[in-house]
Image (cartoon, grey):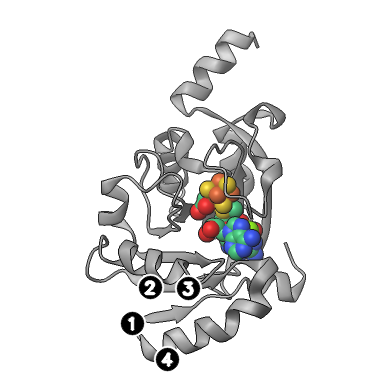
Amino acid sequence: MLKKEIENLVDKGEMLPLMEQFYTIQGEGHHTGKAAYFIRVGGCDVGCHWCDVKESWNPDTHPPTHIDEIVSQAKSYSNTIVITGGEPLTWNMQPITSALKKEGLDIHIETSGAYPLTGIWDWICLSPKKMKLPQPEVYEKADELKVIVFNKHDFKFAEEQAAKISGNCQLYLQPEWSVREKMMPLIVDYVMKNPKWKISLQTHKYLEIP
Ligand SMILES: C[S@@+](CC[C@H](N)C(=O)[O-])C[C@H]1O[C@@H](n2cnc3c(N)ncnc32)[C@H](O)[C@@H]1O
Ligand SMILES: Nc1nc2[nH]cc(C(=O)O)c2c(=O)[nH]1
Ligand code: SF4
Ligand SMILES: [Mg+2]
């Protein structure tokens, strides 16, 4: 296929720069413990210094892959699909989510919300970042707000973000992995004093699974 044709299909969301896809257990947030098929789409310019998948950032290092190919793999593994990245909302998510919906699958997204919300979602996990705050419609539609706690200032940021979401959104504080031992006691204390929050741990890292 010509480079121009591929670029055109990527623009429309018919092809996506695919970093990896894998069947595992959702390790974080509300659906922790649930078997799910992960689709990791490359491309992110948010720039979190502690990001645990920096290899995802440059979309040019991930092959443009037709969504039909991604969906046919996904449906053979699980009824629950998690689209993550990179930042999936960098791309038009309408085509891939409608194709997954046609197969009757439950579709979840892991997003910073930094770009406009495209696609059809059964579950939206919003993990806001200070450098590029979420778009208003992502705050409205989020089912879960998962704030990463790297230092003590992040509790204030978490409350500011919680003030922007809709009523029945679940609230999670998740320690940044490299400082988990230092931050966990503060998070435990915070959640006991502010029980609208729950703790989310990256359980897949403790389990040493993908
Ligand atoms: C790699 S991101 C990809 C999806 C999207 N770009 C986002 O940030 O939500 C997936 C999840 O991992 C979280 N995350 C990334 N690096 C982390 C780290 N070092 N410690 C804890 N959580 C991390 C993100 O905040 C997000 O909730
Ligand atoms: N097991 C597992 N659960 C996860 N939940 C969110 C992840 C992500 O990187 O988006 C992730 C991941 O990479 N692995
Ligand atoms: S927004 Fe997500 S993928 Fe992008 S740098 Fe931050 S954690 Fe990594
Ligand atoms: Mg991860």
Q: Determine the quadrant in which ligand 2 lies.
A: bottom right
Say few, some or many: other residues with alpha carbon within 10 Å of mark 2 (under 14 / 14 to 19 / 20 or more): many
Quarter location, residue 97:
top left
Decide: is 105 above or below 95.
below
Tag 1: Cα neighbours inside 10 Å, few (<14), some, or many (≥20)? Answer: few
Residue corresponding to mark 1: 196
Q: Amino acid at mark 4?
A: Met
Q: Which mark is residue 192?
A: 4
Tag shown at residue 137: none
First reached walking from the N terminus: tag 3 or tag 1: 3
Callouts 1 and 2 close, C-beta under 8 Å? yes
Name the residue at 46% across, 52% down: 129
Mark number, residue 171: 2
At 58% from the left edge and 16% from the top edge, which residue is drawn?
6
Q: Position of residue 179 (x, y in %)?
A: 66, 71
Return the residue at label 3: 173
